[in-house]
């Protein structure tokens, strides 16, 4: 495997200064914990902030830090206190974090935060560019570095770049609230592969690309001017064996003595040995639903009083972003809520909620998982939530119940858990009761299924799947890149053109000779195009044919003065210079009265769409409609038409944001077949841009030059980027400066 460069906001280790000595300690966080076992076993290098700002470390100490971090396969990216406050505590955690978790009321939009975010992304890029090579693989993580993929792409056009987002990606309606939305999306599109935890986040991202930037998208891909980008979901796993083995070690060491966890809840009477424990462990963050969880537990004690003094909640809240106002307010409210519940229901021998506001070492966390009877994991919005998976991996006796929020990404994998709505107190309370009364056999069956699934798809498998997908998209890009016309190929085309005595030029119109327009009826040839066509058609050795999906009346009005052939409606009508239009074969059009009402129905339901009625075809255009709605309606329309068109000998042609219904078997390839066969041609050039032109490429001889405009999978020999490049090539052939 090639060298892997991992980039994240924080390194997996942190630098601590104690009494003028430098210490390296493990970082706390899901990414650092999850990726630790993977990156250590590969040829890799991890870039990130080391946990100490520039004002806290001298140049001499930086040298010492670099040496210590080299042993950890890490490279530091230093930030000033100001940049850290503005970029991390500001834009990342006061703008992106709340918005992406749908807390729009907490979102701050400040230009100075954005400037710092932009600056820090450039600092990361600067440090990376000192180290990376073209054959490296760069894997960037999370919302702190949205701009970084494009910054690297500008310097290394062909390097493999993957990006993984560990938080939810919101719907377009939420994302569009960001004033800097376009810049962020363009930054992300510098990556070759974009990964998300769930298909919902993937779908939201593709929808946003289509609606915000107008890019052509399909299933799990995006077509840009230069390359194809893949978007996919990869549910992050955990180091399953590490949790499983630690749980076994803890149970073995506790044989014959009381566990520390039971002691934590102050069990002082004989009946307390049977006390049921509910574990609630999270960062203290408003997205985790901790207040809702506490209120639901309070409601449980009220609704089911028989469980008082028989069950306690261990609430472990890890401090997070303690200087941010919303987090300070949350801490205050949680403290008050716990005090109220304990004061209302607690007794001398029983405390309903045992509260710990701190982080715990790994072995104590696993012991909590092992000896808790229930895990209450109920975020109101969460990208994945690895705590749910860690709890299941630690249940080596297969007993215990996971209560999991449907808003957590992990709920899609852990369907055997008790899935709840975190905002429904009644549902949560009933689920706690169900968990307490669930038979052990049912617990074991459910947990065994989840454990097998998590064991198979662990963090190693997750990372390898991502890397394999990145390699696949780079191979596909390489194949497309091989079709990109180079200056050498252009010279070869020009030389063959100059030597030839009988030339045939086959040119599509919309999207090839002229850019697509949202006002298609106004998209006639401009002055530059008319000059190109005039020069090409005045050359005696040339036979030029324009092939279009437009109707014959429009093409006649635009091109009758030129000495060229015309093919209209994708092959229905043909016209040579000086002759009248003729049909390729007798075609009926009485079917239109059956199809037109269906198209009109969809037009009424899709603002901005319209029907174009040609002599022998109908076209439903959705170029001016909302991209998301238009694409959805196009799929619905196609499904509705399929059963009807089969019996009528019709086919549905999909073009650039349009569906055309026409007689089956009539296409561009069939229309030009006779032109190819009728002359002793020694030069053929065909240029098109969409799927309708594939019929044209298929019938061309191997000696022909076929060119597609745009980079997608195509039978054409070569690709050009845009209309401007097509015109540049034609001007070169026509000797136009």
Image: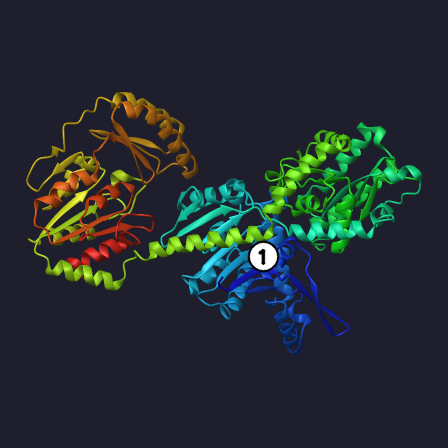
Q: In this view, does 239 lie to the left or right of 172?
A: right
> Quick check: can you spot residue 501?
yes
> Quick check: can you spot residue 359?
no
Residue occupying image coordinates x 69% and y 62%: 26
Mark 1 lies on a secondary structure that is: helix
Give the image's coloring scheme: rainbow
Q: Position of residue 544 (x, y in %)?
A: 13, 48
Q: In this view, does 215 lie to the left or right of 569?
A: right
In this rendering, is residue 173 above or below 464? Answer: above
Q: Where is residue 608 in the image (x, y as percent from the top left)?
A: 37, 34
Quarter of the image with the C terminus in it: bottom left
In the image, 75 versus 116, the foreground residue is: 75
Residue occupying image coordinates x 43% and y 41%: 219
In the image, 554 versus 481, the foreground residue is: 481
Q: Position of residue 15 (x, y in %)?
A: 68, 67
Determine the image quadrant of residue 34: bottom right
Q: Position of residue 628 (x, y in %)?
A: 43, 38
Q: In this view, does 459 lie to the left or right of 20?
A: left
Residue occupying image coordinates x 65% and y 35%: 416
Q: Mark 1 points at which residue?
A: 113
Q: In this view, does 203 lie to the left or right of 720?
A: right
**Crowd tier of the residue under label 1, counting other residues whose Cα lies within 10 Å: few below 14, some 14–19, many 20 or above:** many
């Amino acid at each position: 495997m090639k060298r892997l460069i991992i980039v994240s906001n924080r390194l997996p280790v942190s630098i601590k200064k104690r009494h003028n000595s430098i210490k390296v300690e493990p970082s706390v966080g899901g990414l650092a914990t999850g990726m630790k076992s993977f990156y250590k076993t590969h040829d890799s290098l991890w870039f990130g902030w080391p946990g100490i700002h520039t004002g806290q470390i001298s140049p001499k100490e930086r040298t010492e830090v670099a040496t210590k971090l080299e042993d950890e396969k890490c490279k530091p990216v230093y930030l000033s206190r100001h940049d850290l406050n503005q970029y991390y505590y500001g834009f990342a955690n006061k703008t992106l974090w709340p918005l992406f978790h749908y807390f729009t009321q907490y979102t701050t939009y400040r230009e100075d935060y954005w400037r710092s975010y932009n600056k820090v992304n450039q600092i990361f890029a600067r440090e990376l560019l000192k180290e990376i090579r073209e054959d490296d693989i760069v894997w960037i993580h999370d919302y702190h570095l949205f701009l970084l993929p494009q910054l690297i792409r500008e310097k290394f056009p062909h390097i493999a770049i993957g990006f993984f987002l560990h938080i939810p990606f919101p719907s377009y309606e939420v994302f569009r609230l960001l004033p800097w939305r376009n810049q962020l999306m363009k930054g992300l599109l510098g990556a070759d592969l974009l990964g998300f935890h769930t298909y919902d986040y993937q779908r939201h991202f593709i929808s946003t690309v289509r609606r915000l930037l107008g890019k052509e998208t399909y299933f799990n891909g995006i077509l840009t001017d230069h390359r194809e980008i893949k978007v996919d979901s990869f549910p992050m796993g955990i180091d399953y064996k590490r949790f499983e083995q630690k749980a076994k070690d803890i149970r073995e060491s506790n044989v014959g003595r009381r566990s520390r966890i039971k002691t934590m809840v102050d069990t002082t009477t004989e009946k307390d040995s049977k006390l049921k424990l509910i574990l609630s462990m999270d960062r203290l963050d408003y997205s985790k639903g901790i207040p809702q969880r506490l209120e639901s537990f309070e409601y449980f004690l009220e609704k089911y009083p028989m469980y008082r003094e028989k069950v306690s909640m261990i609430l472990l809240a890890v401090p997070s972003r303690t200087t941010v106002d919303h987090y300070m307010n949350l801490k205050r409210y949680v403290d008050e809520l716990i005090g109220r519940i304990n004061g209302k229901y607690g007794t001398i021998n029983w405390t309903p909620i045992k509260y710990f506001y701190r982080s715990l070492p790994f072995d104590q966390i696993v012991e909590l998982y092992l000896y808790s009877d229930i895990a209450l994991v109920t975020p109101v919005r969460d990208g994945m939530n690895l705590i749910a998976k860690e709890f299941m991996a630690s249940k080596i006796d297969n007993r215990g119940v996971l209560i999991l929020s449907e808003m957590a990404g992990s709920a899609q994998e852990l369907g055997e858990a008790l899935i709840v709505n975190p905002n429904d107190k009644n549902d949560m309370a009933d689920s706690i009761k169900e968990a307490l009364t669930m038979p052990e056999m049912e617990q074991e069956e459910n947990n065994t299924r989840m454990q097998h699934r998590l064991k198979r798809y662990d963090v190693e498998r997750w990372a390898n799947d991502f890397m394999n997908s990145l390699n696949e998209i780079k191979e596909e890009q390489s194949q497309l890149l091989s079709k990109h016309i180079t200056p050498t190929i252009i010279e070869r085309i020009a030389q063959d053109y100059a030597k030839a005595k009988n030339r045939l030029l086959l040119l599509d119109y919309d999207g090839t000779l002229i850019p697509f327009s949202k006002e298609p009826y106004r998209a006639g040839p401009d002055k530059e195009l008319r000059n190109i066509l005039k020069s090409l058609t005045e050359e005696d050795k040339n036979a030029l044919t324009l092939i279009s999906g437009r109707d014959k009346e429009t093409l006649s009005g635009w091109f009758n003065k030129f000495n060229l052939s015309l093919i209209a409606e994708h092959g229905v009508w043909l016209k040579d210079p000086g002759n009248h239009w003729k049909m390729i074969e007798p075609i009926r059009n009485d079917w239109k009265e059956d199809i037109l009402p269906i198209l009109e129905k969809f037009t009424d339901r899709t603002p901005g769409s319209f029907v174009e009625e040609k002599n022998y075809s109908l076209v439903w255009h959705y170029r001016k409609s909302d991209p998301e709605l238009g694409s959805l309606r196009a799929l619905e329309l196609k499904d509705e038409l399929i059963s009807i068109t089969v019996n009528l000998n019709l086919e549905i042609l999909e073009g650039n944001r349009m569906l055309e219904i026409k007689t089956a078997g009539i296409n561009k390839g069939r229309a030009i077949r006779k032109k190819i066969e009728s002359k002793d041609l020694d030069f053929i050039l065909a240029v098109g841009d969409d799927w309708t032109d594939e019929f044209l490429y298929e019938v061309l001889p191997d000696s022909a030059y076929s060119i597609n405009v745009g980079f997608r999978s195509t039978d054409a020999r070569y690709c050009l980027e845009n209309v401007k490049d097509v015109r540049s090539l034609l001007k070169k052939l026509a000797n136009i400066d």
